Image (cartoon, rainbow, N blue to C red):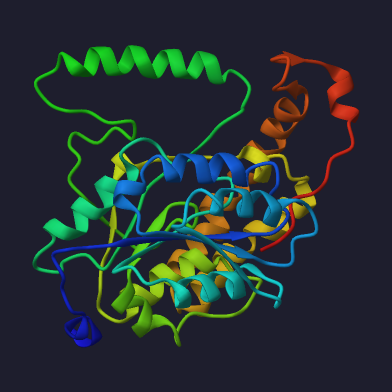
Amino acid sequence: MGAAEDVQLDTSMTLSVVVPAYNEEDTIGDCLRLLLEQSDHIAEVVVVDNNSTDRTVEIVESFIAEHPIVRVLPESQQGLVYARNAGMDSATGDLIARIDADTRVPPGWAKTIVDFFSSDSSGQWSALCGHGAAYGLPFEGWKQRQQERFATVAARLPVRLHRDGAVSDEPRSSPVLYGSNMVVRRDVWAIIRTRVSMRRDIFEDVDMGLCVRDIGCKNAFLGSITVGVSPRRMETGMASFVQYMSFLPRTLLMHRRFGLATLMLVGYLPPLFVVHGLRLILIRAYDPHSSTFGVRNLLRSREERILP
């Protein structure tokens, strides 16, 4: 299996969580609180400060005082790929999770990850990812009620159903990884460390997943580790969103996935841009604090989501 044969197995897995952060004072506190509720299964949390100018570092340091498993690591070279590499290079766990500062992990997230890899005695899976579900969106309460009703019905069925429609929680193969919710074995990271691109105009998580595949290893997808993510990328203006999504086919082309890149350009991105335009109006008209819609909300000044 090529380089995959060099991966060493360990049945007593420790988990490090790396959180790149740039001006994340609004989200980093909730992110860390939810991680620390699962400290029994997390060996360390490494927050990589990528030149924040707000209270991000101050907030992280307030957690460090009471939770020694948290540490902050500065990275002066601007860009998600540099912050990611600094954190993952510094991580000491057998498993390295990489999440975003706005990620909200659900109960049992860390335990599920550790158990998943610890039970993979054959080393079938080298990396793992799950979904990200946006929070703070219009009609979120209605959506939550529908999910609860679905769960009640599903509990009465003879098979186990999940949010993503899967019949069981068996892992399935994934060609790529999802940056807000992904894990890689540390020895696999050591192999792909010199293979991942340092370009800032690609999807670094897709690149990592394809690098795992390129060395003959496999990425798993598990529906039960779905995390919450901020909808701020959905609030991005159309021009910025189109620029950001152009990173996807560029990443695929870089890995010579020509057919998949063509499919993205022709079949996926055009309808996605239409959907984004429609949801942008809905999201910007919505005030999550008062749970109301209003035309005046559309006129509020907004800070564009920066590129990675």
Residue at point 46%, 72% (across, down): 88
Q: Name the spot of residue 132 as percent of width and height, x first.
A: 46, 43
Q: Is residue 90 above or below residue 172?
A: below
Nearest the viewer among 247 and 180 is: 180
Q: Residue furthest front?
A: 65
Nearest the viewer among 293 and 49 is: 49
Residue at point 34%, 66% (across, down): 184
Residue at point 47%, 75% (across, down): 90
On-image quarter of the C terminus: bottom right
Seen in the image, is 90 located left or right of residue 246? left
On-image quarter of the N terminus: bottom left
Residue at point 46%, 39% (across, down): 34
Q: Name the spot of residue 44 as percent of width and height, x first.
A: 41, 60
Nearest the viewer among 257 and 230 is: 230
Can residue 59 be seen here? The reply is yes
Q: Name the spot of residue 117 as percent of width and height, x first.
A: 20, 59
Seen in the image, is 287 located left or right of residue 174? right
Number of numbered tags placed on the structure image: 0
Can residue 132 be seen here? The reply is no
Q: Name the spot of residue 35 as percent of width and height, x first.
A: 44, 45
Q: Is residue 238 above or below residue 200?
A: above
